[in-house]
Amino acid sequence: MKLLDTALRQDVAFVPGDPFYPGGDTGSHMRLNFSNAPPEQIREGIRRLSIAVAHELERSLAGARGEGQHGLANDQESRVSRTTGQQRRT
């Protein structure tokens, strides 16, 4: 769910996989829909999702090392410009 929150800040979403495992599977899963989007939209969505994953990995590693949070923590959001595709800090 932390990754979903971070992904939403990148204007991309996925469905967490836990509801699809009624037996209580606790693995980390997500469901992505590729059936109703053109290839360029899929590429952009995956690019944005990769930014969210990188931020969550950075946050997890910093926490494991006992460091302060980095990346999107401290209310600094990394957004992707829809027109240029460039990452910017806000």
Image (spheres, rainbow, N blue to C red):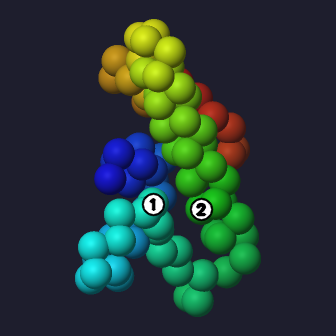
| Vertical arrangement, residue 67 with respect to residue 31, above or below | above
Image point 53% across, 26% down: which residue?
Answer: 61
Label count reads 2
- Residue 71 % position (x, y): 50, 24
Task: Tell me, yes or no, if residue 50 can be seen here.
Answer: yes
Q: Quadrant of residue 22?
A: bottom left
Residue 4 rendering spot, x and y as whole percentages? 38, 54
Disc 2 and disc 1 in contact, CB within 8 angstroms: no
Q: Could you say which is closer to the camera, residue 12 or residue 50?
A: 50
Expressed as whole percent of the image width and height from the top left, the position of residue 2 reads 35, 45
Please tell me whether mark 2 or mark 1 is closer to you in this view. Answer: 1
Badge 2, how many Cα within 10 Å: few under 14, some, many 20+? many
Q: Disc 2 marks which residue? A: 45
Which disc is residue 28 wearing?
A: 1
Residue ranking furthest to the top = 67
Estimate how packed mark 1 is, as few (under 14), some (14 to 19) or many (20 or more) residues with alpha carbons within 10 Å: few
